[in-house]
Amino acid sequence: MTPSDFLLTGPLPRLSGAVAQAARTVAGFARTIAHRRRVQSLLELDERALKDIGLLRNDVLGALAQPLFTDPSTVLLIRSVERRARARTSPMEAERPDPVCRPRHDPARL
């Protein structure tokens, strides 16, 4: 085994992989903290402004109540999309006519 082979297969690549993973973890946590601050600023909006972007105050509070490692902006995105999907299906269901109730054919009644 040559010294260059040792550098390619020894502990150095594993160490650099671990350092890279740690750097990604720290960067992800920093991004989550930045998103948490932005979501916190949504609490300064009034109910009407929150409704304009498809949110309720309870959505924002609930997202901020998630564990520290959970990105609250992702939670808000999911809730907003779910609310829009429910709003789209509800009017369609209201427009759908009620099924016609037809009496069953009962030969004994003839």
Image (tube, helix red, strand yellow):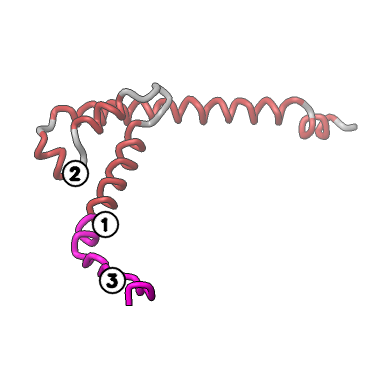
- Kindly identify the residue that appears in the image at 24 percent across and 26 percent down: 40
Q: How far apart are marks 2 and 1 (CA)?
A: 19 Å
Secondary structure of residue under mark 3:
loop
Give the total number of marks visible in the rendering: 3
Q: Mark 1 points at which residue?
A: 89
Dot 2 or dot 1: first in sequence order is: 2
- The span picked out in magenta is 89-110
Mark 3, residue position: 102
Quadrant in the picture for residue 4: top right
**Marks 1 and 3: which is nearer the front?**
3
Q: Which of marks 2 and 1 is in front?
A: 1
Q: Quadrant of the C terminus?
A: bottom left
Instruction: Indicate the quadrant where residue 54 lies.
Output: top left
What amino acid type is highlighted by mark number 3? Arg
- Residue 33 drawn in magenta: no
Q: How crowded is mark 2: few (under 14 residues within 10 Å), some or many (20 or more)?
A: few
Of the residues under marks 1 and 3, which one precedes in the sequence? 1
Residue at (71, 31) in percent of width and height: 13
Q: Specify whether residue 100 is painted magenta.
A: yes
Q: Is 12 rendered above or below residue 74?
A: above
In the rendered structure, which disc, 2 or 3, sits on the residue that comes first in sequence?
2
Q: In this view, does 91 lie above or below 21?
A: below
Residue type highlighted by circle 1: Thr
Name the foreground residue: 92 vs 105. Answer: 105
